[in-house]
Amino acid sequence: MTITPVSTNRRAFLALVGIGAGAALGAGRRHLVGLPTPKRLRPPGARSEADFLAACIRCGQCVIACPPDALRLADLEDGIAAGAPLFDSRENPCNLCAGEDELHCIAVCPTTALNALDDRADARIGTAAIDSERCFAWNDTVCRACWHACPYPNSAITLDWKSRPQIVADACTGCGLCDHACLTEPSSIRIAPFGVGVDA
């Protein structure tokens, strides 16, 4: 049996193809890792974003356990945060497991990504902010939708003497129920994730 040697030109070509493929894969990985992490709303009890992403193993147990099906896993567009849980307050907010004995996402988390909370009112998912130029109540139209939706009315959301809603940042959990209930489109309420200023 005769073995035909691979020509130098063919060998060089294959080497270039291999180098090119490796470079492409490496560049793709660097691109994915280098992407800035979008500001996302995380489950209750989540640590600071960097610590949360470092501890979260992307197992999806919190998504499965979430009673209102609010949580979902981040897509590849989220870069290094891909696979981590998040929710969209406008589409499906966190109801803080209302009526349940525990916060299920925290209960099933196998790592330290989510901190245990003594009181769900201590959850700091984010902070709500109201756009007074868009809000009905701030423009002489009676509306208390956000106040009624808030799990802590008169604590996290108060009404002034004109029945205009105001956010009490220290008491706001960032659950997003107010954003979900807002009657304007787009919403007059924005939820800034934990650790991110509402003007960021």
Image: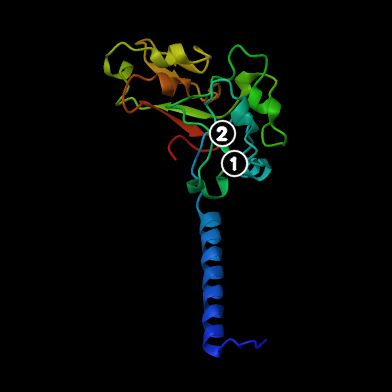
| Label 2 crowd bin: few (<14), some (14–19), many (20+), radius 10 Å | many
Instruction: Place residue 71 in its image quadrant.
Output: top right
- How many numbered marks appear? 2
The amino acid type, in three-letter code, at marker 1 is Glu
Q: State the separation of the CA atoms marked 2 and 1.
A: 9 Å
The secondary structure type at the circle numbered 1 is: helix
Q: Is residue 153 left or right of residue 135?
A: right
Which dot marks residue 42?
2
Q: Residue drawn 47% across and 25% down?
A: 92
Q: Is residue 180 left or right of residue 125?
A: left
The secondary structure type at the circle numbered 2 is: loop
C-beta proximity under 8 Å, tags 2 and 1: yes
Where residue 164 appears, as percent x and y from the top left, is 37, 15
Q: Residue drawn 67% across and 14% down?
A: 101
| Label 1 crowd bin: few (<14), some (14–19), many (20+), radius 10 Å | many
Q: Kindly give the residue lying farthest to the front in the view shown.
A: 1
Coloured how?
rainbow
- Compare residues 60 and 52 and report the one nearer the observer: 60
Instruction: Place residue 69 in its image quadrant.
Output: top right
Instruction: Give the residue pinned by disc 1.
Output: 49
Instruction: Place residue 18 in its image quadrant.
Output: bottom right
Where residue 163 appears, as percent x and y from the top left, is 37, 11
Q: Nearer the viewer, mark 2 or mark 1?
A: 2
The answer to whether residue 30 is above or below residue 82 is: below
Where residue 156 appears, as percent x and y from the top left, is 51, 18
> Where, quadrant-wise, is the C terminus in this rendering?
top left
The amino acid type, in three-letter code, at marker 2 is Arg
The answer to whether residue 22 is above or below residue 143 is: below
Asked whether residue 164 appears in the rendered view, the answer is: yes
Q: Kindly give the residue lying farthest to the left in the view shown.
A: 140
Q: Is residue 186 left or right of residue 127?
A: left
